[in-house]
Image (cartoon, rainbow, N blue to C red):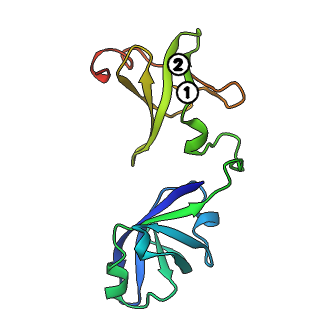
Amino acid sequence: MQVVVARIGRAHGIKGEVTVEVRTDEPELRLAPGAELATDPAGTGPLTIESGRVHSGRLLLRFAGVHDRTAAEALRNTLLIAEVDPAELPDDPEEFYDHQLVGLDVVTADGTALGSIAEVAHLPGQDLLIVARTGGGEALIPFVSEIVPDIDLDAGRAVVNPPPGLLDGGDET
């Protein structure tokens, strides 16, 4: 299974480094030197990570064969894609891959069915579960432990404890 792990940003300096927007909870594994990643658009890759470092809170990567600013700038907005075994689980039992969450039934703590997870949106502030509502429309549920206290992969469900107003009105279509 292919998973997007980062998006290449702008060039940094003149020696081929680029900033990256990390889209994985395991950058030390997925974006390590020597990792070969597929790309979108496909014609840009595959790319092999030559080196990486953190500078002012941002991850900088250098790829094999990319040694100047012009070549680095040509990679801007390219998605980096890793091959992940669908059966692989994150080391932390409180973390999940998107493909594990999509399709889970969503119920409230009292057992009321709300729908199923259609997508996981990764926003700068927090992740959101996009839930396709049983009666139509969708709900955006912040993926934080106070609101989503239980994910049971074996039972195929996510239990939510929405605060008042979260599921009312404007979030349905």
Q: Mark 1 points at which residue?
A: 148
Question: Quadrant location of the C terminus?
Answer: top left
Dot 2 alpha-carbon crowd within 10 angstroms: few under 14, some 14 to 19, many 20 or more: some
Dots 2 and 1: beta carbons under 8 Å? Answer: yes
Q: Mark 2 points at which residue?
A: 161
Query: In the figure, 148 relative to 120: above or below?
Result: above
The residue shown at (63%, 78%) is: 34
In this rendered view, identify the residue nearer to me: 105 or 146. Answer: 105
The residue shown at (61%, 73%) is: 35
Name the image quarter holding residue 145. Answer: top right
**What whole-number distance in Å separates the C-alpha atoms at marks 2 and 1?**
6 Å
User: Looking at the picture, which amino acid does disc 2 mark?
Assistant: Asn
Query: In the figure, 152 relative to 31: above or below?
Result: above
The residue shown at (42%, 81%) is: 17
Measured as percent of width and height from the top left, residue 105 is found at: 56, 23
* Secondary structure found at label 2: loop
Measured as percent of width and height from the top left, residue 81 is found at: 51, 63
* Secondary structure found at label 1: loop
Name the image quarter holding residue 136. Answer: top left
How many marks are shown on the rendered structure? 2
Query: In the figure, 50 relative to 99: above or below?
Result: below
User: Looking at the picture, which amino acid does disc 1 mark?
Assistant: Val
Measured as percent of width and height from the top left, residue 19 is found at: 40, 72
